């Protein structure tokens, strides 16, 4: 149940104006901090900072190793942060179980929700077919969680669909929590 009665939406920290990107910049979106922050509790999360990558940092990219898609250093492929990002995604289920939506950074190898470029080593070509490693963990541990990226958020129709899904997800979560509490108190 929501303590402050505001639905919680997780947001990639760089979209909130935090200079956490690999190059020390942000990708601030006024609509998020100006409008959404009035109606929702925004939870700032940056998986790359959370796993200790720091700022500035060497960039990572997605590479298809034949068995799975890994997040590795662009210049140092031995720098594989895949498992750390997956583990951090799992930890969010414990630290923020009440989030009801997530706004991700488009094209990010950790946070891009769709069409993130994946390098195919045999050809050296990037194909826009992946999702960020951290996003895959969030989707696994928060089934049905509404997600969007900042570009789609700026499309009024898509943004309204996202907000409606967030509201429905919150109601479902609160109903499940209430039902669980009710059953445990009456048995």
Image: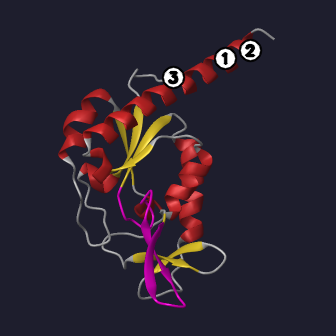
For the magenta stretch, what is the residue range?
Answer: 105-129
In whole angstroms, how far apart are the C-alphas of marks 2 and 1?
A: 6 Å
Q: Residue at x 47, y 35 (%)?
A: 100
Please name whichever residue, 166 or 22, is drawn nearer the observer in this view of the structure.
Answer: 166
- Helix, strand or loop status at disc 2: helix
**Colouring method of the image:** secondary structure
Q: Residue at x 38, y 35 (%)?
A: 161
Task: Determine which of the numbered discs, if any, sits on residue 171 in the image.
Answer: 3
Q: Earlier in the sequence, mark 1 or mark 3?
A: 3
Residue on which disc 1 sits: 179
**Mark 1 against mark 3, which lies toward the viewer?**
3
Q: What main secondary structure does the magenta stretch of the protein show?
A: loop
Are circles 1 and 3 on residues that touch, CB within 8 Å? no
- Helix, strand or loop status at disc 3: helix
From the top left corner, tell me how far across and down residue 22 is, in percent. Answer: 32, 71
Q: Residue at x 67, y 76 (%)?
A: 67
Task: Determine which of the numbered discs, if any, sits on residue 92 in the image.
Answer: none
Q: Residues within 10 Å of mark 2 (few under 14, many from 20)?
A: few
- Helix, strand or loop status at disc 1: helix
Q: Residues within 10 Å of mark 3 (few under 14, many from 20)?
A: some
Are circles 2 and 1 on residues that touch, CB within 8 Å? yes
Position of 136 with respect to 19 (left or right) is: right
Work out whether 55 lies above or below 31. below
From the top left corner, tell me how far across and down residue 44 is, in percent. Answer: 36, 47
Residue 114 lies in the magenta-colored region: yes
Residue 135 lies in the magenta-colored region: no
Position of 130 with respect to 33 (left or right) is: right
Residue on which disc 2 sits: 183
From the top left corner, tell me how far across and down residue 168 is, in percent. Answer: 48, 26
Q: Quadrant of residue 8?
A: top left
């Amino acid at each position: 149940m929501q303590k402050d009665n505001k639905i919680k939406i997780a947001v990639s920290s760089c979209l909130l104006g935090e200079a956490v990107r690999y190059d020390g910049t942000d990708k601030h979106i006024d609509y998020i901090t100006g409008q959404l922050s009035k109606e929702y509790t925004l939870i700032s999360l940056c998986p790359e900072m959370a796993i200790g990558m720091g700022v500035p940092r060497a960039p990572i990219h997605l590479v298809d190793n034949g068995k799975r898609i890994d997040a590795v250093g662009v210049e140092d492929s031995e720098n594989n942060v895949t498992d750390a990002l997956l583990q951090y995604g799992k930890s969010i289920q414990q630290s923020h179980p009440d989030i009801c939506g997530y706004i991700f950074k488009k094209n990010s190898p950790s946070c891009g929700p769709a069409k993130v470029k994946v390098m195919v080593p045999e050809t050296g070509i990037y194909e826009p077919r992946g999702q960020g490693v951290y996003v895959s963990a969030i989707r696994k541990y928060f089934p049905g969680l509404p997600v969007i990226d900042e570009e789609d958020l700026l499309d009024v129709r898509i943004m309204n669909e996202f907000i409606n899904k967030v509201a429905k997800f919150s109601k479902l979560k609160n109903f499940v929590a209430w039902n669980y509490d009710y059953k445990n108190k009456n048995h």
